[in-house]
């Protein structure tokens, strides 16, 4: 999706919150935004057909909120694109409805936005809501089959991610995007629907020459997996399908041609981790649950294969945006890759 150029409010941060039947989580999210200091906010809520009273709550909110009401669940990508289209800010932030921002969140991201040339994205420090001493994500890393993971995911927060630095891209749970970048490269790829969409947008931005910085002082707490559930096979299918689509659309051919090898290595590593009751597979106890996981991966890969032709067409369109050569993209991915050993013991 491409944005029309519109009048921009200088100094305004437009914050987009996508919601689907999470009234109480949304309430806490909006309350955290009402406590923001040091930045002028425009709040935009996109509701994807909620039936739990979420819309009525937003309509009666004591401070102004722009509400877009969809009649059905259009997904994370399409809903955020609706928000991009109406946002007035020079910078546009995303905040999940299941996340709560610390009072300086937006202001700290704005501070870091000037830390380097061509900054188009800023990543937050995302902590686990139930255990705020533990990292959910501090930017992103990627494995070379297209599977992306949060940097530091699962680690105790002991100051190891307390410095401003470049990261690969921000997590869409809590991120800041420069309007100029979104207008240049387009919004989220709506074919992805949800999950992995932030990786696709982020890597597309990097290929177009934009940088991503990490703001350690921009802290949010996140209820992980509250939208579909951590053990949802539908969630697993979207994650697996979209990692294939990301690779087909954006990876250099030198890495893409080895995708099956990287994928099989990851599956083997996951199986080894499961033997020691670690990693993602441990969340699926018993033969039946593990079989459902295998079937979800197979269905996802088949779905991805059906979408490969349209991703290849989009791959050609990326050439008009390109500022990094394929070798530079390869170097970027290698510099921010997650090792197979780390991946073995992490859970999505």
Image (cartoon, grey):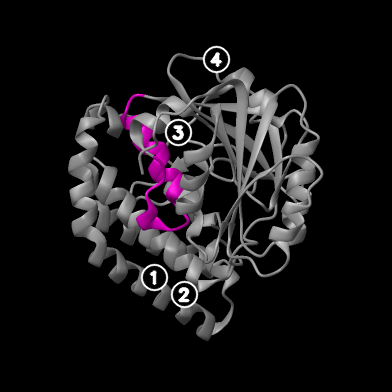
First along the sequence among labels 2 and 4: 4
Residue, disc 1: 297
- Element at badge 2? helix
Q: Residues within 10 Å of mark 1 (few under 14, many from 20)?
A: many
Image quadrant in which you'd find residue 347: bottom right
- Element at badge 3? loop
- Element at badge 4? loop
Identify the mark at residue 168; answer none if there is no mark: 3
Q: Residue at x 21, y 31 (%)?
A: 320
Q: Quadrant of the C terminus?
A: bottom right
Q: Bounds of the magenta span?
A: 187-209
| Residue 347 or residue 112, whichever sits in front | 112
Q: Residues within 10 Å of mark 2 (few under 14, many from 20)?
A: many
- Element at badge 1? helix
Whether the residues at callouts 2 and 4 have beta carbons within 8 Å, the answer is no
Queried whether the magenta region covers residue 205, the answer comes back as yes
Q: Position of residue 14 (x, y in %)?
A: 60, 33
From the viewer's perspective, is the residue at label 3 or at label 4 nearer?
Answer: 4
First along the sequence among labels 3 and 1: 3
**Image position of 149 with respect to 56: above or below:** above
Residue, disc 2: 293
First along the sequence among labels 3 and 4: 4
Inter-mark Cα distance, 1 to 4: 41 Å
Queried whether the magenta region covers residue 180, the answer comes back as no
Whether the residues at callouts 2 and 1 have beta carbons within 8 Å, the answer is yes
Q: Position of residue 231 (x, y in %)?
A: 58, 70
Q: Residue at x 76, y 31 (%)?
A: 36
Inter-mark Cα distance, 2 to 1: 6 Å
């Amino acid at each position: 999706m491409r944005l029309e150029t519109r009048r921009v409010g200088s100094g305004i941060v437009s914050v987009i919150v996508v919601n689907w039947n999470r009234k109480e989580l949304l309430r806490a999210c909006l309350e955290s935004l009402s406590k923001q200091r040091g930045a002028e906010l425009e709040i935009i809520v996109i509701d994807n057909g909620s039936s739990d009273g979420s819309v009525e709550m937003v309509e009666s909110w004591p401070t102004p909120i722009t509400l877009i009401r969809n009649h059905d669940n259009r997904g994370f990508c399409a809903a955020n694109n609706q928000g991009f289209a109406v946002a007035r800010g020079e910078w546009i932030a995303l905040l999940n409805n299941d996340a709560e921002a610390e009072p300086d969140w937006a202001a700290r991201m704005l501070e870091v936005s000037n830390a380097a040339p061509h900054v188009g994205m800023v990543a937050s420090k995302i902590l686990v809501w139930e255990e705020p001493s533990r990292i959910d994500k501090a930017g992103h890393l990627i494995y070379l089959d297209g599977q992306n993971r949060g940097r530091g995911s699962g680690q105790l927060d002991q100051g190891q991610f307390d410095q401003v630095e470049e990261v690969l891209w921000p997590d869409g749970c809590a991120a800041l995007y420069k309007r100029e970048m979104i207008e240049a490269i387009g919004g989220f790829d709506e074919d992805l629907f949800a999950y992995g969409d932030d990786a696709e947008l982020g890597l597309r931005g990097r290929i177009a020459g934009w940088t991503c910085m990490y703001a350690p002082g921009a802290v949010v707490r996140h209820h992980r997996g509250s939208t579909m559930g951590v053990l949802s096979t539908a969630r697993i299918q979207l994650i697996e399908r979209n990692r294939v689509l990301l690779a087909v659309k954006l990876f250099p051919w030198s890495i893409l041609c080895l995708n099956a090898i990287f994928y099989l290595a990851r599956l083997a590593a996951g199986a080894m981790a499961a033997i020691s009751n670690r990693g993602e597979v441990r969340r699926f106890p018993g033969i039946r649950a593990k079989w459902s996981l295998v079937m979800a991966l197979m269905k996802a890969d088949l779905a991805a294969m059906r979408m490969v032709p349209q991703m290849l067409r989009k791959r050609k369109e990326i050439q008009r945006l390109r500022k990094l050569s394929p070798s530079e993209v390869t170097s970027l991915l290698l510099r921010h890759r997650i090792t197979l050993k780390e991946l073995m013991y992490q859970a999505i």
